[in-house]
Amino acid sequence: MATSGFKHLVVVKFKEDAKVDEILEGLENLVSQIDTVKSFEWGEDKESHEMLRQGFTHAFSMTFENKDGYVAFTSHPLHVEFSAAFTAVIDKIVLLDFPVAAVKSSVVVTP
């Protein structure tokens, strides 16, 4: 099985008073300014049963070319600054950082 990049996966539950739209806008701005982020996706859970979700509401996924790209991202001054604001509005968080084992890559279909 080949590896295909390095993934940073974050699953969070925001605090009740968090301005989630502002955080999402800040996160989208952040990843657009740091070249080592090769892809960024996020979503808000709308489908899972609360018992299975355990209070978590949002997931964020970033892909890097390799671990060095991830390390460069985490030490970038813009990331360090954003992390302080992000951490302040988090109630619960799970972080997973791992080399990607590509089994079936996504296929983009164009009309």
Image (cartoon, rainbow, N blue to C red):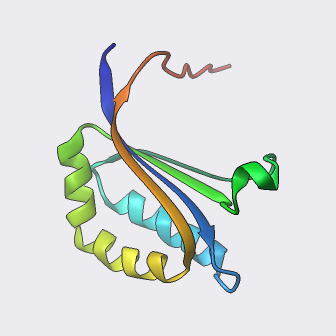
Whole-percent x, y for residue 101 in the image: 37, 24
Residue at horizontal 57%, vertical 63%?
Answer: 12
Can you say whether 3 is above or below 76 in the image? above
Q: Residue 26 vs residue 37: left or right? A: right
Residue at horizontal 48%, vertical 66%?
Answer: 27
Residue 107's quadrant in the figure?
A: top right
For this orientation, the residue located farthest to the top is 1
Q: Residue 57 vs residue 3: left or right? A: right
Q: Residue 89 vs residue 9: left or right? A: right
Can you say whether 41 is above or below 5 in the image? below
Whole-percent x, y for residue 93 in the image: 52, 64
Camera-nearest residue between 8 and 94 = 94
For this orientation, the residue located farthest to the front is 51
Camera-nearest residue between 80 and 35 = 80
For this orientation, the residue located farthest to the bottom is 17
Can you say whether 14 is above or below 16 in the image? above
Residue at horizontal 23%, vertical 38%?
Answer: 66
